[in-house]
Image (cartoon, helix red, strand yellow):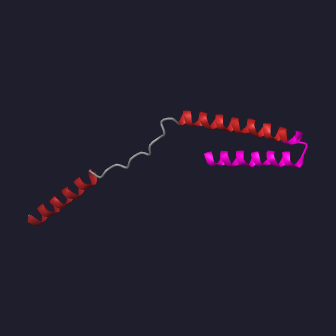
Amino acid sequence: LSRSLEELAVTFISETIESIKPTPLKPAVPLNTRQEMFQKQQKLEQYITRSKELIAGLSQAQSKEEKESIMCSVREWSRYVKFEH
């Protein structure tokens, strides 16, 4: 009789422990996902516009120095955009 009570107690305790294990937390979803996507789209559009301006300037550049200056601006702008992401 004591053995069956002991087994019953062990089973009860084991089942109770199993039932109170914490449930895994769900990963947090960013609240401003739509806003973040909008900001990224605006930055991309700004990058494209500025890049087109620089390339247009490059095609109109007369001297080697002017072309090098514009290319330097293109590289700086590209680094800036990569740094932002």
- Residue 50 x %, y %: 74, 37
User: Is 60 placed above or below 17 here?
Assistant: above
Which residue lies at the image location 56% right of the left edge and 37% below the top edge? 36
- Residue span colored magenta: 58-85
Q: In which quarter of the view is residue 51 placed?
A: top right
Magenta residue check for 77: yes
In the picture as drawn, the residue positioned furthest to the right comes out as 62
| Residue 13 percent coordinates (x, y) | 19, 57
x and y percentages locating residue 63 in the rendered image: 90, 46
Residue nearest the observer in this picture, 31 or 1: 31
Q: Nearer the viewer, residue 23 or 19?
A: 23
| Residue drawn at (12%, 66%) of the image | 3
Q: Residue 28 vs residue 21: left or right?
A: right
Relative to residue 62, is residue 53 drawn left or right? left
For residue 69, side relative to residue 40 (left or right): right
Q: Which residue lies furthest to the bottom in this view?
A: 3
Residue 44 covered by magenta stretch: no
Q: Which of 66 and 41 is in front in this view?
A: 66
Residue 59 visible from this viewpoint: yes
Q: Residue at x 18, y 61 (%)?
A: 10
Residue 59 lies in quadrant: top right
Residue 69 lies left or right of residue 16; in this view the side is right
In what quadrant of the picture does the N terminus appear? bottom left
User: Relative to residue 10, is residue 69 depicted above or below?
Assistant: above
Q: Can residue 85 be seen in this view?
A: no
Residue at 53% from the left image edge and 36% from the top image edge: 33
Q: In the picture shown, does residue 19 fall above or below 44?
A: below
Please tell me whether the stretch drawn in magenta is mainly helix, strand or loop: helix
Which x, y percent locates residue 78? 71, 47
